[in-house]
Image: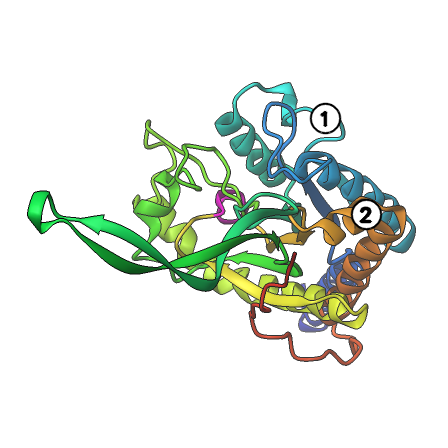
Amino acid sequence: MNKNKLYRCVKSFFVAGILLFSGFGAWAQQKPVLGTIIIDPGHGGIDPGASGQFSTEAAVALSISLKLGKALTTELPDSKLIFTRTTDELPGGLNSIHDALRYRADMANEAKGDLFIAIHCNANGMRAGGWYAKRVVGHKNRTVYVGKGPKRRKKTIREPIYESYWQKNNEHGTETYIWAADRTGYKGNAINSTGGGGGNAYDTTGGEVVEDSTNMLDLNSPEALIRSQLYEKKYFGKSMLLATMVEDEFGKQGRFSRGVKQRNEKGIWVLQATGMPSILVETGFISQTEEEEYINSEKGQEEIVTAIVNAIKRYKSSLEGGAAPAQQTTPAPATEPAETSK
């Protein structure tokens, strides 16, 4: 083979290589950044989650999740949607809350999801709606006798006057949780905490907390620590971005946003166990009368879905390098003073 033929062969291979890799790059660019979205309605079956005056967290979360899936099918037709459950049962038809949590994470990971969204309702651990309490409204004098025999005498004492009043359970608003990748000092205790002090498999804020006597979910293991480091690098920023956008969209609707939260003291296991950007949306307090009515209403659920869908579309645009709509700063976590009425 002369030099000219050799030159032409090398040149042909070089050009073919450029075309091949260019084509691969174009294919990679065409691949949807949100190819698979996992929607996880919290609780279900034997695990009703938090309870309101007339509804349960599991039922509300499922209803909102199904509406969310329907909306995403229209808005993001290129995305594949996977639900961890579509009926009022634990995922996989299981009868163990612990196994169902693992099933949720395994389902998401096996599907190689690009995004995991858990839908929940919040509660503050107090009686839904409100409760009767007592307060001091004044004082009165009362005469009592003290001593015995010759030393017996009258004594005037001052005692409080109480009245009963209705204390409204007024804690309300939205929150979006992400897994706290820097919670190294809390990992051991978080997963073993039962939440609420009563041995429940969920805590009153709706986050999943697993009691694990077998130590299968040991967050201090080398594997878990490596996963934590990878998560922090690959997923933490994306999770924070989407969570911030979700709360921003709620704020635009006039909802009281309590902000984006990282769970430090109690672990949200489904978030740390999914190998993808993951958020848990607390859509409202089921323990507050007006908010329970809102999150059960068609109007309320449609508005919640709209906020989440708008946030996901902004998030997708950001990943694709487009200009996402300007977002407001997520309100810092806050607590409004409780209202009381007689």
Mark 2 / mark 1, whichever is N-terminal: 2
Q: Is residue 217 above or below residue 213?
A: below
Callout 2 secondary element: helix
> Foreground: 167 or 50?
167
Residue 120 position, x and y percent, is: 65, 46
Residue 90 position, x and y percent, is: 63, 26
Quarter of the image where one finds residue 213: top left
Residue at 39%, 33% (x, y): give it: 211
Q: CA–CA distance between discs 2 and 1?
A: 17 Å
> Foreground: 227 or 91?
91
Residue 293 position, x and y percent, is: 79, 47
Residue beneath label 2, please? 68
Residue at 48%, 28% (x, y): give it: 98
As drawn, the residue found furthest toward the left would be 150
Residue beneath label 1, please? 88
The span shown in magenta is 268-274
Residue 103 position, x and y percent, is: 57, 30
Residue 269 lies in magenta, yes or no? yes
